[in-house]
Image: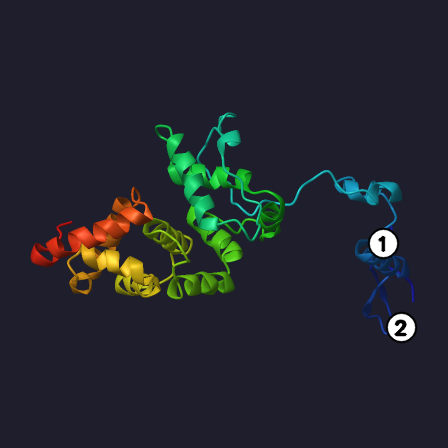
């Protein structure tokens, strides 16, 4: 067989006539070889040790010494940066209260004091919620700061969320139950004055605002925990009709007796009780 006349391209197929005179297509070995070579070159993975195509990844050029040292960056904050701009004046931060995460610290008291400071420095056009969200991390120290940095990055969007997570961490269930027991099992101490007893009881209530007790239960717990002399003073001042008051009136009356008794000493209390008891029985005492 002889190829058709004309100039042949080594990379292209060509036609020849067989013995019977029919045209037959011949694929050149060189063309097939070139196709295989090109396909292999296109699919060949890049050598991981070569520097070709690695200009966009600076970590590939870091030495062993560089890799042994920490990078110059910090972990992302758990607080999502707000879109609004807020300028924090330098004189505000030193005035903020601090919280270290100790068992003796009261998280509720810290939040209240922090919010009072924020309300003082609120400026026109500045959202108070945004100010609290930005300033609160400056108040946390030691264990409290470590806790804040351990939160999942970009997980907090609002001041309400940050406050809830803070109280969940530093006011756990066992602490709530302990304070609730202090309220329900409250009792006066020996030789304790009425106003001292009442102030200590109110401190226990304020230390656990989420105690869940109704007002009538709070009055009952305090009344049951009073000494006999305190109950005598209380009943004397209200004409022996304390339990007839509604819960809110009873709380107000206890607070009133506490303020009045602040200026008494023990001998005066006994003298007042003996001298005024008959008057209160006749017409009662008005508060």
In the rendered image, the vertical position of residue 175 relative to residue 100, given as above or below: below
In the rendered image, the vertical position of residue 86 relative to residue 199, given as above or below: above
- Crowding at label 1, few (<14), some or many (≥20) Cα neighbours within 10 Å? some
How many marks on residues? Answer: 2
Where is residue 152 drawn, in percent x and y? 58, 53
Secondary structure type for disc 2: loop
Q: Residue at x 19, y 64 (%)?
A: 243
Where is residue 145 drawn, in percent x and y? 60, 45
Q: Residue at x 41, y 43 (%)?
A: 112
Instruction: Say whether disc 1 or disc 2 marks the residue closer to the N-terminus.
Output: 1
Label 1 – label 2 distance at C-alpha: 25 Å
Compared across the picture, whether 224 is left or right of 61 comes to left
Q: Can you see residue 158?
A: no
Residue of label 2: 19
In the rendered image, the vertical position of residue 235 relative to residue 19, given as above or below: above
Residue of label 1: 11
> Nearest the camera: 122 or 32?
122
Asked if the residues shown at circle 1 and circle 2 are in contact, with their CB atoms under 8 angstroms apart, the answer is no
> Nearest the camera: 22 or 184?
184
Compared across the picture, whether 248 is left or right of 2 comes to left
Q: Residue at x 42, y 35 (%)?
A: 118
Where is residue 154 drawn, in percent x and y? 54, 49
Compared across the picture, whether 118 is left or right of 22 comes to left
Residue extending farthest bottom: 20
């Amino acid at each position: 067989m002889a190829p058709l006349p004309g100039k042949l391209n080594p990379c292209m197929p060509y036609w020849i006539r067989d013995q019977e005179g029919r045209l037959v297509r011949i694929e050149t070995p060189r063309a097939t070889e070139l196709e295989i070579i090109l396909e292999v070159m296109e699919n060949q993975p890049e050598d991981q040790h070569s520097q070709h195509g690695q200009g966009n990844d600076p970590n590939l050029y870091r030495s062993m010494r560089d890799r042994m040292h920490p990078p110059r960056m910090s972990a992302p904050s758990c607080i999502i940066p707000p879109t609004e701009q807020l300028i924090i004046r330098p004189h505000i931060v030193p005035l903020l209260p601090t919280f270290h995460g100790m068992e003796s610290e009261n998280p509720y008291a810290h939040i209240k004091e922090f919010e009072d400071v924020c309300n003082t420095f609120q400026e026109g056009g500045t959202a108070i919620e945004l100010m609290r969200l930005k300033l609160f991390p400056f108040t946390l120290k030691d264990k409290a700061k470590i806790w804040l940095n351990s939160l999942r990055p970009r997980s907090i969007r609002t001041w309400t969320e940050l406050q809830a997570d803070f109280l969940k961490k530093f006011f756990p269930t066992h602490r709530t139950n302990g304070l609730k027991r202090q309220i329900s099992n409250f009792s006066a101490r020996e030789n304790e004055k009425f106003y001292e007893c009442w102030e200590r009881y109110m401190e226990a209530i304020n230390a656990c605002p989420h105690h869940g007790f109704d007002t009538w239960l709070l009055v009952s717990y305090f009344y049951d925990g009073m000494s006999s002399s305190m109950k005598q003073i209380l009943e004397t001042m209200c004409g022996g009709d304390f339990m007839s008051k509604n819960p809110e009136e009873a709380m107000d009356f206890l607070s009133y007796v506490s303020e009045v008794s602040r200026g008494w000493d023990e001998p005066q209390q006994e003298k007042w009780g003996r001298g005024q008891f008959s008057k209160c029985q006749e017409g009662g005492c008005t508060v």
